[in-house]
Image (cartoon, rainbow, N blue to C red):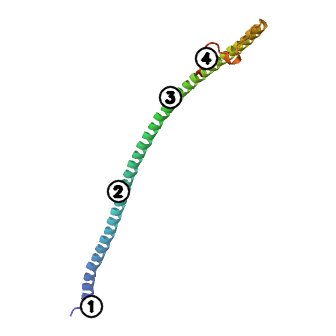
């Protein structure tokens, strides 16, 4: 019959592989957790890289749109400035023409007043000379202006 020490040796010999198996299981579990953590970290890094790529592409598209809009606004501003310059030139020409026309109207009004004074003077001279002046309705002379009522 085997002795107590033999049983203890056999139990000890049996416990050692169990301990080694447990340590191997524990190491494998820890390694598996580490692998999962590393894989998760890599997936997160890859997702961050993809987000960065998407953000960079969105930024480039936004930058292109902004630059195009800015370019269009600059062209439109140039056209508006050109039109404003042309309007200013046209306005100065119109003002000059308006001033010239006002001056001409003043001269014509002065000539009309001078002609009216001349007519009054001639009428007075005709009356003083004993002649009958033409009626006021015929002051336009032998040439009738406007439609004739006959």
Which mark is in front, 4 or 2? 4
Label whose residue precedes the other's in the sequence (3 or 4): 3
Front position among marks 3 and 4: 4
Q: Is residue 88 above or below residue 110?
A: below
Q: CA distance from mark 4 to mark 2?
A: 101 Å
Q: Secondary structure at mark 2?
A: helix
Check if mark 4's residue and mark 1's residue have beta carbons within 8 Å: no
Earlier-in-chain disc, 1 versus 3: 1
Name the residue nearer the viewer: 40 or 76.
76
Label 4 and label 1: CA atoms lie apart by 161 Å
* x and y percentages locating residue 57 in the rendered image: 38, 48
What number is the disc on residue 46? 2
Q: Secondary structure at mark 4?
A: loop
Left of 1 or right of it: where is 41?
right
Residue ranking furthest to the bottom: 1
Q: Mark 3 to mark 4: distance in Å?
A: 52 Å
Query: Dot 1: within a 10 Å radius of its alpha carbon, few (fewer than 14), some, or many (20 or more) residues?
Result: few
Label 4 crowd (10 A; few <14 / some 14-19 / many >=20): few
């Amino acid at each position: 019959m085997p002795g107590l020490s033999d049983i203890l040796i056999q139990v000890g010999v049996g416990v050692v592989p169990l301990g080694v198996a447990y340590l191997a299981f524990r190491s494998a579990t820890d390694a598996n957790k580490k692998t999962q953590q590393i894989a998760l970290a890599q997936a997160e890094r890859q997702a961050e890289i993809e987000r960065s790529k998407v953000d960079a592409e969105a930024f480039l598209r936004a930058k292109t749109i902004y630059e195009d809009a800015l370019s269009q606004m600059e062209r439109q501003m140039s056209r508006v400035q050109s039109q404003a310059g042309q309007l200013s030139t046209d306005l100065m020409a119109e003002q000059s023409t308006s001033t010239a026309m006002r001056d001409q109207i003043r001269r014509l009004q002065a000539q009309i007043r001078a002609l009216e004074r001349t007519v009054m003077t001639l009428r007075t001279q005709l009356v003083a000379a004993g002649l009958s002046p033409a009626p006021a309705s015929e002051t336009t002379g032998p040439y009738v202006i406007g439609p004739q009522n006959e």
